[in-house]
């Protein structure tokens, strides 16, 4: 994947643990607009690459903004980004979307928890400016830990529903109250901890179809031990490759010179998605939607395997 050099032009301490980082191109040219809900790969000072949602105004072409929460058990990614200074250089990918505003929807419900506000913020900012019907439900432990709260209170206070200090046990009750009466043709979008999103999905599907529920997930699914895997074959462009139990599809394809892009290698970024022409994928990713998985037409080849003996793939 091609990465571009950018310069840190501003850093804001949004909460005690969250910083927002503004990026501009090194040559001064515009980075360009992006679709609401998009994310980028960020290669940090320690050469660790992580995915971060953009939370700036999607229509503003001059700069990108993303936010980083410093994790207590960081493996170097978030901690290193919190040590950045204005003028430092990073490398980023072009924006891509795993969650996007559904054009068929007439009303949109955004549900964010903690740092999950970041993709919801770009969507809210876009819909607010363009007069699209929406509401935003923001869950956080305390008001002081709610990143971008002053901005939201200033720009769209009538669309913002604040849920601070709600215990995990009470979250489902609050969600049921808030999602009880939705306008026709509503779509629901959520981002936050995996357990929280599971609750949102379970409550939301009581009121809308699964296809109208959109999740942004940057947490990898737990993978089974390689001893539970079986070898199988993959055909691509007329060539057949054997995938052993201890290697992923993408590892074998890249080892044989196939041009398959990767980034996270954990099934959460969507970079390695390929088209399935034949065979039955065993999905192990956390990036494809339920509908995409059920269709069997695409798969994330960095972690997923097959339920059979053979797959025929094509570039997506």
Image (tube, rainbow, N blue to C red):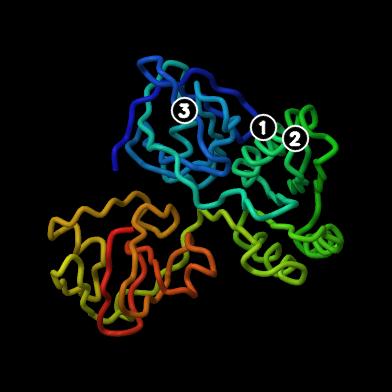
Q: Which mark is residue 103?
A: none
Q: Are marks 3 and 2 in contact (CB under 8 Å)?
A: no
Find residue 152 and report its horizontal and vertical position in percent: 75, 33
Query: Which image quarter: residue 84?
Result: top left
**Which residue is painted at 82% across and 64% down in the image?**
176
Name the N-terminal-most of marks 3 and 2: 3
Q: Which residue is mark 2?
A: 144
Quadrant occupied by the C terminus: bottom left
Q: Image quadrant for the N terminus?
A: top left
Element under label 1?
loop
- Residue 306, image x and y in percent? 33, 78
Q: Secondary structure at mark 2?
A: helix
Query: Mark 1 vs mark 2: which is more N-terminal?
Result: 1
Foreground residue, 304 or 128? 128
Query: Alpha-carbon distance for marks 3 and 2?
Result: 32 Å
Which of pointers 3 and 2 indicates the residue nearer the eye? 3
From what the image shows, is residue 289 above or below residue 310?
Answer: above
Q: Is residue 261 visible?
A: yes
Q: Which residue position is annotated with label 3?
A: 32
Asked if disc 1 and disc 3 are in contact, CB closer than 8 Å, the reply is no
Residue located 23% across and 80% down the image: 231
Front residue of 18/126: it is 126
Q: CB atoms at circles 1 and 2 under 8 Å apart?
A: yes
Give the label on residue 15, or none. 1
- How far apart, in angstroms, are the residues tagged by discs 1 and 2? 6 Å
Q: Is residue 19 visible?
A: no
**Mark with earlier residue (1, 3):** 1
Q: Is residue 71 above or below residue 233?
A: above
In the image, taking residue 245 as reference, residue 303 lies left or right, namely right
Q: Secondary structure at mark 3?
A: loop
């Amino acid at each position: 994947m091609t990465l571009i050099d950018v310069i840190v032009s501003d850093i804001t301490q949004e909460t005690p643990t969250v910083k927002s980082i503004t990026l501009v191109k090194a040559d001064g040219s515009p980075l360009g607009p992006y679709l609401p809900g998009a994310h980028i790969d960020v290669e940090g000072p320690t050469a660790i690459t992580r995915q971060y949602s953009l939370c700036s105004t999607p229509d503003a072409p001059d700069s990108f903004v993303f936010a980083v929460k410093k994790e207590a058990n960081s493996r170097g990614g978030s901690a290193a980004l919190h040590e950045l200074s204005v003028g430092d250089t990073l490398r980023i990918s072009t924006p891509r979307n795993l969650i996007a505003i559904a054009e068929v929807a007439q009303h949109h419900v955004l549900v964010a928890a903690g740092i999950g506000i970041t993709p919801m913020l770009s969507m809210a900012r876009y819909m607010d400016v363009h007069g699209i019907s929406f509401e935003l439900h923001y869950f956080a432990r305390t008001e002081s830990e709610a990143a971008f709260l002053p901005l939201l209170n200033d720009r769209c206070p009538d669309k913002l529903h604040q849920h601070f200090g709600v215990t995990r046990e009470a979250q489902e009750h609050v969600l049921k109250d808030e999602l009880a009466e939705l306008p026709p043709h509503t779509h629901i979008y959520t981002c936050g901890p995996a357990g929280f999103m599971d609750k949102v999905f379970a409550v939301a599907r009581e009121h809308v179809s699964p296809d109208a529920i959109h999740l942004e997930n940057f947490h990898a699914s737990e993978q089974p031990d390689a001893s539970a895997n079986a070898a199988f074959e993959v055909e691509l462009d007329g060539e057949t490759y054997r995938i052993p139990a201890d290697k992923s599809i993408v590892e074998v394809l890249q080892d044989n010179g196939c041009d398959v892009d990767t980034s996270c290698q954990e099934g959460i970024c969507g970079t390695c998605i390929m088209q399935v022409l034949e065979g039955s994928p065993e999905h192990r990713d956390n990036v494809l939607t339920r509908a995409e998985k059920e269709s069997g037409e695409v798969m994330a080849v960095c972690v997923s395997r097959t339920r059979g003996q053979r797959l025929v793939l094509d570039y997506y």
